[in-house]
Structure formats: structure tokens, C-alpha cells
Amino acid sequence: MHVSLVGINHRTAPIEMREKAAIGPDSLHAYLHLLRRHLQHGVILSTCNRTEVYSTGSRAGDVDQACVDFLGNSMGLTESATTCFYVMSDRVALEHLFDVSCGLDSMIIGEYEVLGQVSQALEAAEKSGTVNLPLRRIFESAIRTGRRARNETGISRNPLSISSIAVNKALDIVDDIGRCKIVIIGAGEAGRLALRVASGRGAADMAVVSRTLERAVRITGTCGGRPVGPDKLAVELRDADIVIACAASPHPVLHHRQVSDVMNTRPQRPLIIIDIALPRNVEPDVGSIYNVHLYNIDDLNKLADNHRQEREAEAAAVKEIIAEEAEILMNWLLAYSARPAIKSLMVRAEKIRAAQYHNSIKKMASLSEEEKQHIDLLTRSIVDKILRYPILYLKEGGDADRMKSINRIFGLDDGKEL
């Protein structure tokens, strides 16, 4: 069995390209449906840093190409964009997913949010019917590995997130945190984290803008701030000092004309906008407006690099856990791949054993039922012992060459009796 991973992330592609490939929670089911036109089974993992497709199949080249075709065609990416794709196979692909789950492949090393996103990717694929047993086992192993890394190492000690780095970046710029006004666009997990960090830093005037007002009410009820509907966004921007944009929207929610109109009413008062959404919430040319300071998720990379260096020692311990879990999973996958051949071998052997047993029993009419049962069990035991090492041989490496060898030795393909 071949495990395939095709993806695009913050290391291989600029934000302009990544946002085209980004898939929000609301559209994930639709894209999984599109994936089925290319592959029978697959899981899509899309975060602020990456979009990846995991699949399994018997023919490596076919599965890899199907994943590439899906990402290229479904996302409307140009042919040149496919040069930013990375393709990984088998153990390398598994260890990459484990790196992701443990937070080693994130901009913020050890972040918590990505483990939940891996879990949600599996859950969405389950609901869409695109998960087979190997993919389920792969993702469950990745989730378990991510939890072990956080429980057994310090990789997530004093955890940071993109939201916390964004808020801290903005608050470090303003003169008086207690008097500044913060507008957070988006009431999802990123918005909740941003609100909590801002409150912890001493910000008092915070507005959470969400198209779903109930969500804004819910997070402000626990973290402070005011819930605001999208129709009041322009009003809130008029006296804002900081805007954190993190809404799960496929289109920009802050436009050049909108921000320009606001800044015309306050030309001498700067506005800091940090857009950590993907796709971006803010039109890029908003940054050209006088006194507007616009940052996107890639602009936070330098700050994240400093954090990454602090976690390198812990990353080594996490790698040991990943290697251990990957070995366990690879052994399971090898055994799983061998199941059809093992089943054929056992069925063929049992058919021969049963036929020989019944032919012999007919000639020994004087045997009691107990004696017949004893002979039956004896012949079964002999077959089991004979098959033990061929089965172990297959489980140790369920590759095509081993299966062909067993098929040839035991005549599983020709249908002839031994």
C-alpha cells in the first residue's frame, strides 16, 4: 500500500498562492466531494500555513498524480503553481503528518491549534465518506503522537499562537495599552485567542466583530470585550488603534475604499492592521493608505523564528516520539497491506486441508466422533505451523514482490491444487 501526501505550505509558496489553495471549514465538505472525482479515499488538511491532501492506494504514481490534479484543478492554480507542491510518500509522508500534529512544522513551534485542525480534518473526511481504514489509522496515530509530544516534552510549554504573536506585535507598537482600542474581526478560535491575549496585556476597549453575533457574544462573555455586528464595523474603525483580522472568510472583509474613508476622518491617527487570516481578510493595497500599517501572516515569520530557536532542544525529544510512533504505524500498514495475500494463503491451505481430511475420514469409518475431532484439530494445527513463517514474511513487508513470491510458491494465482 502506498501512502501519498501532496501539499503546499508557508515554506514552499508565498501567501498570494497559499490563499488560493486555502479551504475554510464551511467549504471543506464541498472540496472533499470534489476530491472523490480524483480519488476514492483522501483527507484534506487546510490550516493558515498549509493545504495538504493525504491518500492511499496500490499504485504510487497514480495516487500522487491524482492528488496533484485535485490541488491544481480544484483550486484554480496556474500550472506554474504546481512547482510549489511537495510530494511525499510512505514513511516520509507519515513523519511529516506527525511533525504537523506535534507543531514542529508550524510557524509557531509547538502551537496547540494545529492538533485540533488535524482532528477536524479526519472528522470532516469521516462525515464525507472519504476515509478508509488505513487513513483513519494514520490520522489517529498522528493525533496520539501530537498529544504525547505535548504531554511528555516541553514543546508546548508557555504556548504561543499566531494570534498571540499578532496581538503582542501590535501592542508593542502603541504607547498606552490601557487607552488603545482594539477591533478583532472574527469570533472563531483565532479571535478568541487574540481577545484573551489582549485582555491579559491590559487592553480595556475591545470590540469583536462577527457575522454570527452569537459567537461574538459567547467569546466576549468569557474573555471580555463587546460583541459587534458586521454592519457596525465602519463605526468601530473610526477610533480604532489596532485591528486584528482573523475571520474565516473566502473574500476580503476590509477593502481599500472602506479603510480610506475611515482614515479621511482621522488622517493623523495611525491604524495598525494585522491580518492573520488565510485567505487574507484585508485587501493588500490597504497598506498603501497613509498612516495605515498593514502586516500579514508572513510578516510575523521573523518573530516566529526567534521562538523557534528557543524550542529546538524540545524538538529533538519530540522527534524521538515521532520515530517511535512512525515505526509502530509502518508495521501496522505493512501487515494491513499483506492481508489479501494472507487471506488467500489461509483460504487455499484450509481448502486443501479440509478436502484431504474428509477424504481420509471416509476411509476410517471405525473412528469415533471424538477421534475425528482430534484429527481435525491436529491437521489444523499442522497447517497453522506450516503457514506461520510465510505469514510473518508477508507481514514484515507487504510489498508487491513478497506477495508475488508467496503467490508463486503456493500457486495462489493459477487456481491449481497443491
Image: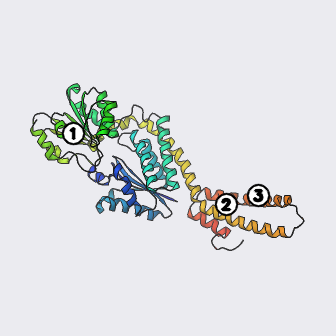
Find disc 1 in the rendering and name its residue. Answer: 273
Disc 2 designates what residue?
390
Helix, strand or loop under label 1: strand
Residue 45: x and y in percent read 40, 50
Picture disc at residue 417:
none
Are the two marked residues, 1 and 3, in contact with CB atoms closer than 8 angstroms? no
Q: Secondary structure at mark 2?
A: helix
Q: Position of residue 119 (x, y in %)?
A: 44, 46
- Disc 2 or 3, which lies upstream in sequence? 3
- Please indicate, yes or no, whether residue 104 appears anywhere in the rendered image: no
Query: Which residue is located at x 48 percent, y 38 percent?
Result: 149
Marks 2 and 3, Cα distance to the nearest angstrom? 15 Å
Rendered image quadrant of residue 230 = top left
- Eyeballing the image, is 235 above or below 345? above
Say what amino acid the circle numbered 2 marks: Pro
Given the image, on which type of amino acid does mark 3 rest?
Ser
Name the amino acid type tagged 1.
Answer: Ile
Q: Is residue 24 left or right of residue 399?
A: left
Give the quadrant of the C terminus: bottom right
| SS at mark 3 in the image | helix
Instruction: Count every numbered label the image shows and give the total.
Output: 3
Of labels 2 and 3, the one closer to you: 3
In the image, 169 versus 393, the foreground residue is 169
Of callouts 1 and 3, the N-terminal one: 1
Q: Position of residue 167 (x, y in %)?
A: 28, 34
Q: Residue at x 26, y 52 (%)?
A: 16
- Crowd band around label 2 with a 10 angstrom C-alpha radius: few (<14), some (14–19), many (20+): some
Instruction: State the residue position of label 3.
Output: 381
Left or right, 137 with respect to 365, comes to left
* Tag 1 near tag 2, CB within 8 Å: no
Q: CA distance from mark 1 to mark 3?
A: 73 Å
